[in-house]
């Protein structure tokens, strides 16, 4: 089995298969640690899967546990949603460079072979295997391929399942800051009227750091080409500037990236190849959260291979059924909720309802994360 490349989804699959005694080769054109543009937030689902994979918080240098979530409506109403105390972690933030490096180390530890700095340049499907051509002139032969190769998956192009002109459903913009103020030690979400149904965020990192950014739905009020110009004005809005603090300093350049969020619409398998993570477009369409879904699809793909006993048709059927069972219903619910968040009144009402009582605050936080 080969996963390509080393995303959260790919390494989750590799760890699951290697633990089951399968021979696993992982190929990635990057070398680790490497940055991946991301909001860096980890939901409860992602945390539980990382525990199952054996990834410990102490192995991730920037690991930051989150206790409280502040959500601000377009009218300025602020609601604070507490996560449970004393019962484990329910939300965290970590730089993707640190998280992915830790998962890769875990894959090595359980016996997966990791090939870094080498790109998959072609794929030939045979009756009994798939042969991958690599940029160093070598080849890898696998009985199954798990393609965790991103939104514009090369494996889709190699096997003829790519969607021409696909640009994703969302677009996000991120910059790291240092020396932020004390309010930035919590997690913040701002539903700004001009961003709806998108939002801006500040996610805490160690030593006064923060991942700050915003996401918009493609085709909404703000065009993707306008995001760069909007960024300094967004940071200067008083309620956002107050949270970041007067001494906050950009750590590096800002970066933007598209987000695929069309669960159940793309082909998930072909022959002996299964697509996972962003290559399967399984990001949540309302929150933009994708790490938990990526980890889950990696696990589901690995389990389908284990249960398929070498029959590629059985593997494909099992994997596609598992994705439908675990992710499609949530995707449809998020699409319905987006309708309420498209407009100022809907977003304002939703946040006020969620903030109505201690019970609604507690359970909204659990649902959100």
Image (tube, grey):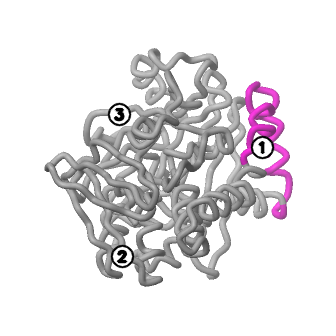
Q: Are marks 2 and 3 in contact (CB under 8 Å)?
A: no
Q: Secondary structure at mark 3?
A: strand
**Cα–Cα span, label 3 and label 1:** 29 Å
**Magenta-drawn segment:** 331-359
Q: In screen coordinates, is 285 left or right of 233?
A: right
Q: Quadrant of residue 54?
A: bottom left
Viewer-proximal residue, 193 or 42? 42
Does 348 lie within the magenta span?
yes
Q: In screen coordinates, is 132 left or right of 117?
A: right
Residue 255 disc label: 3
Comes first in the chain, label 2 or label 1: 2
Residue 332 disc label: 1
Residue 198 in percent (x, y) is at 62, 32
Q: Secondary structure at mark 1?
A: helix
Viewer-proximal residue, 212 or 279? 279
Q: Are marks 3 and 1 in contact (CB under 8 Å)?
A: no
Residue 66 in percent (x, y) is at 53, 64
Quadrant of image for the N terminus = bottom left
Comes first in the chain, label 2 or label 3: 2
**Mark 1 Cα shell of 10 Å, populated few (<14), some (14-19), many (≥20):** some
Q: Residue at x 35, y 53 (%)?
A: 5
Q: Are marks 2 and 1 in contact (CB under 8 Å)?
A: no
Viewer-proximal residue, 115 or 100? 115
Residue 299 in percent (x, y) is at 54, 67
**Cα–Cα span, label 2 and label 3:** 37 Å
**Cα–Cα span, label 2 and label 1:** 37 Å
**Mark 2 Cα shell of 10 Å, populated few (<14), some (14-19), many (≥20):** some
Q: In screen coordinates, is 239 left or right of 328?
A: left
Does 197 lie within the magenta span?
no
Q: Which residue is mark 2?
A: 23
Q: Taking the image as drawn, is residue 182 in sight?
A: no
């Amino acid at each position: 089995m080969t996963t390509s490349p080393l995303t959260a989804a790919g390494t989750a699959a590799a760890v699951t298969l290697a633990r089951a005694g399968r021979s696993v080769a992982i190929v990635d054109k990057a070398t680790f640690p490497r940055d991946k543009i991301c909001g860096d937030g980890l939901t409860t689902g992602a945390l539980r899967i990382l525990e199952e994979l054996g990834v410990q918080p102490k192995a991730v240098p920037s690991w930051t546990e989150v206790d409280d979530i502040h959500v601000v409506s377009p009218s300025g109403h602020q609601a604070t949603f507490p996560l449970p105390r004393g019962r484990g972690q329910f939300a965290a933030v970590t730089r993707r460079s640190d998280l992915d490096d830790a998962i890769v180390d875990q894959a090595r530890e359980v016996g997966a072979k990791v090939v870094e700095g080498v790109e998959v340049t072609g794929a030939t499907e045979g009756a009994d295997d798939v042969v991958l051509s690599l940029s160093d002139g070598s080849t890898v032969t696998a009985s199954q391929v798990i393609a965790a190769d991103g939104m514009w998956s090369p494996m889709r192009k190699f096997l003829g399942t790519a969607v021409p002109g696909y640009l994703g459903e969302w677009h996000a913009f991120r910059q790291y800051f240092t020396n932020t103020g004390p309010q930035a030690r919590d997690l913040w979400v701002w539903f700004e009227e001009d961003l709806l149904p998108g939002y801006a965020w500040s996610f805490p990192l160690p030593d006064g750091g923060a991942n700050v950014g915003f996401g918009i739905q493609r085709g909404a009020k703000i065009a993707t080409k306008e995001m760069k110009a909007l960024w300094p004005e967004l940071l200067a809005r008083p309620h956002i500037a107050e949270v970041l603090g007067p001494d906050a300093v950009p750590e590096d350049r800002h970066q933007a990236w598209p987000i695929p969020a069309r669960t159940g619409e793309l082909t998930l398998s072909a022959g002996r190849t299964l697509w996972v993570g962003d290559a399967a477009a399984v990001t949540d369409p309302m929150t933009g959260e994708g790490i938990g879904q990526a980890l889950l699809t990696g696990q589901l793909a690995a389990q389908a291979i284990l249960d398929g006993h070498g029959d590629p048709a059985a593997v494909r059927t099992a994997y596609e059924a598992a994705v439908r069972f675990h992710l499609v219903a949530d995707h449809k619910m998020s699409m319905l909720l987006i309708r309420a968040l498209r407009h100022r009144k809907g977003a304002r009402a939703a946040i006020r309802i969620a903030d109505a009582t201690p019970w609604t605050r507690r359970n909204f936080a659990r649902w959100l994360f």
